[in-house]
C-alpha cells in the first residue's frame, strides 16, 4: 500500500499541516490568473491550498490516496474532488491552470515527464502550470516505499520538454532557506 493510502498516515499528515498553507506562494498565481478560472490541483492532501484556491477559482481538488479523497470530499462538499494519479491525470479538462504543492517529488523522472505531457493535454495554449517543489530534500530513513526526488529549475525544464515555457521561478524556504522552488510556466 502507498504510504498516503493508509488512513492513519493521511490523518497524521493532515494534523501536521493544521495552520499551514501556501498563501504567500499562491500570490504569484492569483496575480496572473483571473478569478473564476478552472483550476485543477494535483495531490491536494488535506486541502489547505484547495481552500485558498476555492476563494478565487472553480477548483477541482484531487489526490491518488482514497484517504485524502474522502477528507477532501467531506471538507469541500460543494466542490469537485477526484481520485487522480498525478502521472496519468484521468480527468477530462480543459483547465486554465494546474497546481500542485510538494507532490512532484514523489514521481520518478519518467513519471514526471509523463505527468507534464498529460498536463499539457489538459490545458489550452497559454494555459498555466504552477508547481511548488522541493529543490533540496532528505528522504526519510524509514523506507516508506515513496519516491523522494528533489528537482531544480533545470530538471523541471527538462521534464516539461518543449510543451511549456517557464515564465517565473521563485526560490523559498519551507524548513531551510532555498529548499523549495515555485515554478510558473505556460503551455506553448
Ligand atoms: C507532501 S503531501 C502534500 C499534500 C498537499 N499538497 C499539501 O501541500 O499539504 C504529498 C501529496 O501528494 C499525494 N501524491 C503522491 N503521489 C501522488 C500521485 N502519483 N498522484 C496523486 N497524488 C499523489 C499524496 O497522497 C499527498 O497528498
Image (cartoon, grey):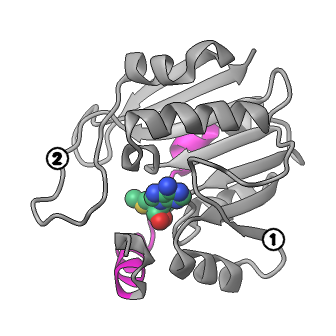
Percent x, y of residue 100? 56, 47
Image position of 29 with respect to 17: above or below: above
Q: Residue at x 46, y 17 (%)?
A: 158
For the residues labelled 2 and 1, the Cα–Cα distance comes to 34 Å
Q: Which sits in the foreground, 50 or 112?
A: 112
Q: What residue is disc 2 on? A: 138
> How many neighbours does mark 2 have within 10 angstroms: few (below 14), some (14-19), or many (20 or more)?
few
Percent x, y of residue 48? 56, 66
Q: Residue at x 45, y 70 (%)?
A: 19
Image position of 176 with respect to 74: above or below: above
Within 8 Å: ligand 1 and the Cβ of disc 1? Answer: no
Q: Residue furthest left?
A: 141
Q: Quadrant of residue 105?
A: top left
| First to last magenta residue range | 8-27
Query: Is the stretch drawn in magenta largely helix, strand or loop?
Result: helix
Q: Quadrant of the N terminus?
A: bottom left
Q: Residue at x 38, y 40 (%)?
A: 108
Asked if disc 2 and disc 1 are in contact, CB closer than 8 Å, the reply is: no
> In this view of the protein, can residue 21 be seen by the observer?
no
Q: Which sits in the foreground, 98 or 87?
A: 87
Image position of 42 with respect to 77: above or below: above
Say whether disc 2 or disc 1 marks the residue closer to the N-terminus. 1
Judged left or right of residue 91, residue 110 is left
Percent x, y of residue 82? 72, 67
Q: Is residue 108 magenta?
A: no
Judged left or right of residue 25, residue 181 is left
Image position of 17 with respect to 57: above or below: below
Q: Is residue 11 magenta?
A: yes
Q: What residue is disc 1 on? A: 79
Within 8 Å: ligand 1 and the Cβ of disc 2? Answer: no
- Under circle 2, the secondary element is loop
Amino acid at each position: 500500500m502507498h504510504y498516503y493510502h493508509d488512513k492513519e498516515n493521511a490523518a497524521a499528515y493532515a494534523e501536521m499541516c493544521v495552520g499551514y498553507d501556501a498563501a504567500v506562494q499562491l500570490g504569484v498565481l492569483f496575480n496572473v490568473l483571473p478569478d473564476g478560472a478552472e483550476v485543477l490541483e494535483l495531490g491536494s492532501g488535506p486541502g489547505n491550498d484547495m481552500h485558498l484556491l476555492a476563494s478565487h477559482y472553480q477548483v477541482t481538488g484531487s489526490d491518488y490516496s482514497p484517504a485524502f479523497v474522502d477528507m477532501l470530499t467531506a471538507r469541500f462538499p460543494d466542490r469537485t474532488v477526484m481520485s487522480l494519479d498525478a502521472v496519468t491525470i484521468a480527468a477530462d479538462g480543459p483547465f486554465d491552470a494546474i497546481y500542485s504543492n510538494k507532490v512532484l517529488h514523489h514521481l520518478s523522472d519518467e513519471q514526471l515527464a509523463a505527468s507534464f505531457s498529460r498536463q499539457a493535454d489538459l490545458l489550452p495554449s497559454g494555459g498555466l502550470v504552477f508547481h511548488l517543489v522541493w529543490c533540496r530534500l532528505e528522504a526519510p530513513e524509514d523506507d516508506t516505499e515513496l519516491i523522494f526526488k528533489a528537482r531544480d529549475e533545470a530538471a523541471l525544464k527538462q521534464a516539461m520538454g518543449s510543451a511549456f515555457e517557464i515564465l517565473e521561478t521563485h526560490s523559498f524556504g519551507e524548513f531551510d532557506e532555498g529548499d523549495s522552488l515555485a515554478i510558473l510556466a505556460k503551455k506553448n
